[in-house]
Amino acid sequence: MDKIPILRMGAFLLVTIQVDLYDRLALNLESDLVNMVNKTSAKGVLIDISAVSIVDSFMGRIIGNIASMSKILDAETVVVGMQPAVAITLIELGLPLKGVHTALDMEKGMSLLKSMMDSDDPDEQETADDTITE
Amino acid sequence: MILMSKKLPMILSLSKDPVQVRQEQDVVFLKNRVKEVAVRIKMGLVNQTRLITAASELVRNMMRYGNGGVCLIEVVSSGRINGVRLTFTDKGPGIPDIAAAMRDGFSTGKSLGLGLPGTKRLVNEFDIKSKVGEGTTVTIIKWANG
Amino acid sequence: MALKTYKLLQNKKKNILELWMKNQLADEGLREDLISNDELRSQSEELITALVSNLSDENFNDLNSDEWSPVLEILGGIAITRARQGFSPRETGNFVFSLKEALLQVLQEELKGDQQAFFNESAKINRLMDNLSVITFETFIKGREEVILRQTDEIAEISTPVIRVWDGILALPIIGTLDSARTQVVMENLLQEIVETGSSIAILDISGVPAVDSLVAQHLIKTVSATRLMGAECIISGIRPEIAQTVVHLGIDLSNIVTKATLASALAHAFKIMRLEVKKSTIIKS
């Protein structure tokens, strides 16, 4: 398998990485995703890495690249479900993934993307279930 | 009078397992072997992740600069604690300035330059020896509970 | 000298054991509450058997030779067990010292007529047994250190409880010094709990941390960064005025971290992030 499937859901693209990425797979994902963002004019990219047990500096760089490239194409990137051990290792490695948004799971990532889109567009009203204080 | 205590801090190698790394598939194989060994000595999950990530960094360096090489996987013991020692040996061009290579943000290749200093932060012991024109040897140790 | 000392000791093994047992049982420091006499006897017998059977003329004063390793292993095992069982160093030491007594007694008995030989041989025995005592103590202390280390781990484990203060909000009060080992435990517990509860906000309360130096600050920053990578926000609360002073004097940059003076204000901040409001009810419900 040399490709990771990219799903489209409304204005967002969803990617679930189920295997430990090797370099070629990661590079393919980077170019596929950026092409897809361009083609679909997606506003957000969600990358689920909850099944990934190792992220080294190369993988970290790919994730950072995806975020920066998508940003240029006007799409925000949210990485969701990072394992605690992976988070600790990345910090110690010196890779805080600046410019990448993170969320605990798909659902939270989705609402984060939605809220980012909402704040871009001040005409749209927020419709959250919680009491709005401000 | 020679006391036994001199023997205690010595690191004993309990098992040796050399893995050849030539192409990308070997990297996956190597990581799996390292994980097996780490699990066998009951290393915690976070330390396993640190060790395998460190191995991943070093093996990438070896592939990129050294044109592949050998990784020796050892279970080592020092007194009451066990650990995993990995020795990466390549016959690449070598590193002319190790001190510079160990600084954060330094890179000759097209990378972030966190490879060596970042790897050092993930493990308990880190040693690098390099001779220009002959190759580079990097040795790391991660203790099971360290 | 007609008979070599080691031969003599081998022949007199039974005598030595009896004498040794007698010495041990006569000692008022004997811990019958910790070890039964039978157990003591079998320990003693095991050691003395290994001792005399591995003894030779050449290795008498070279404890590094291979023949000694079974003896050292047994002795080490006994010392470690005693350390764990709570024997005092004196009681553990007496185990070896009383063996020395027994050996010297037997030797004296055998070499009665030959003062010079007794002197030479007892010097040898003394040196050998002193070495063994040193090893016993070293191992004993190592055993005690192990106990301490295990307790340290336990303390680290129980002293970092993660509390669920609200749905989606975790609090972690840190009490005591934050060193790197402790940070490890705190960080791992916190991150694991975030995953398990799906909490998006964590409050790290450091009111119980006596001092914050640059190393502790680094640990805190690391924990906050790791929390963020997972997609949760981390607030640090309980910053006392003197800690704020040291942080600034040391030139530590905490500007990327949300810091609050009290746990209450951190919780209020968390509510704000989650867009929750606490209201005083106008109607009194019974």
Image (tube, coloured by chain):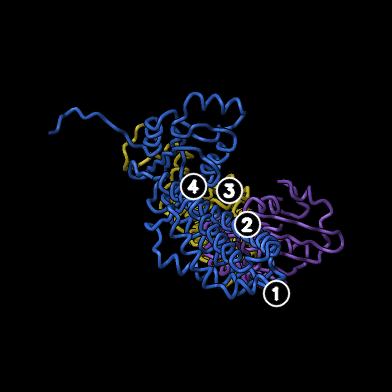
Chain colours: A yellow, B purple, C blue
Which quadrant of the figure has residue B67? bottom right
> Disc 2, disc 1: CB below 8 Å?
no
Tag in front: 4 or 1: 1
The answer to whether mark 4 and mark 1 are in CB contact below 8 A is: no
Question: Mark 2 or mark 1: which comes first in sequence?
Answer: 1
Q: Secondary structure under badge 2?
A: helix
- Quarter of the picture containing the C terminus of chain B is bottom right
Q: Position of residue B21 (x, y in %)?
A: 71, 71
What residue did someone put label 2 on? C130
Residue A28 screen position, x and y as percent? 62, 64
Query: Does residue C9 appear left or right of residue A83 in this picture?
Result: right
Instruction: First in sequence, mark 4 or 2: give its number.
Output: 2
| Residue that mark 1 sits on | C2
Kind of residue sitting beneath label 4:
Met
Q: Amino acid at mark 1?
A: Ala
Q: Which residue is mark 3?
A: A91
Observer-nearest residue: C159 or B66? C159
Q: Residue A79: image x %, image y %? A: 51, 52
Residue for badge 4: C187
Q: Work out how far the residue at label 3 is from the one at label 4, CA to CA, in angstroms.
A: 12 Å
Q: CA distance from mark 4 to mark 1?
A: 70 Å
- Which amino acid type is marked by label 3? Ile
Local crowd at mark 2 within 10 Å, few (<14), some, or many (≥20)?
some
Protein chain holding label 3: A
Q: Closer to the observer: label 3 or label 2? A: 2
Asked if labels 4 and 3 touch by Cβ distance under 8 angstroms, the answer is: no
**Chain at numbered mark 1:** C
| Residue C82 to residue C57: above or below | above
